[in-house]
Image (spheres, helix red, strand yellow):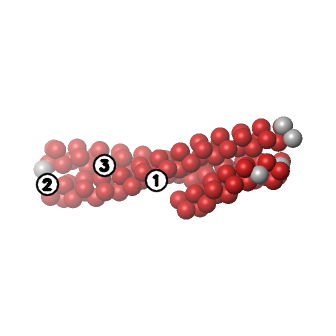
Amino acid sequence: MKNEVKEYLSEVEIRLKDKNSVDEQFAADMLTRIGFYQHERLIHLIVTMTFAIMTVISFYMLVTSYSLAALLLSLLFLGLVIPYIAHYYFLENSTQKLYRLYYEALDIIRHK
């Protein structure tokens, strides 16, 4: 997904430089793609929050029980939640950038 978003952002930026290639269909396609990325972002938010809650619970178990199993569980969840947070951060920033590029495309269309 990360490579797909990066490639699409590059395509959009290239198309926006050539203002003659920007039309209503291009803007509509952008809006559709933004919707897909918003859905992806929502799913990753839910997964990230679930793992964050499980990480906090496992740390609580570690503090209260001091068992090896609780330590391993805490490390496992911590090892999973960090990449999830990084990926969600990327999706959030990329979607925000797409919003700005979409508004730029609308400005180009209005001024034609």
| Residue indicated by mark 1 | 87
Q: Amino acid at mark 2?
A: Ser
Q: Residues within 10 Å of mark 1 (few under 14, many from 20)?
A: some
- Which of the two residues, 91 or 8, is positioned nearer the viewer here? 8
Q: Residue at x 56, y 48 (%)?
A: 94
Q: Residues within 10 Å of mark 3 (few under 14, many from 20)?
A: many
| Residue indicated by mark 3 | 55
Front: mark 1 or 2: 1
Front: mark 1 or 3: 1
* Secondary-structure class at tag 1: helix
Residue 109 image position (x, y, % from top left): 82, 42
* Residue 54 appears anywhere in the view: yes
- Residue at the far front: name it: 17
Residue 98 relative to residue 66: left or right: right
Front: mark 2 or 3: 3
CA distance for labels 1 and 2: 31 Å
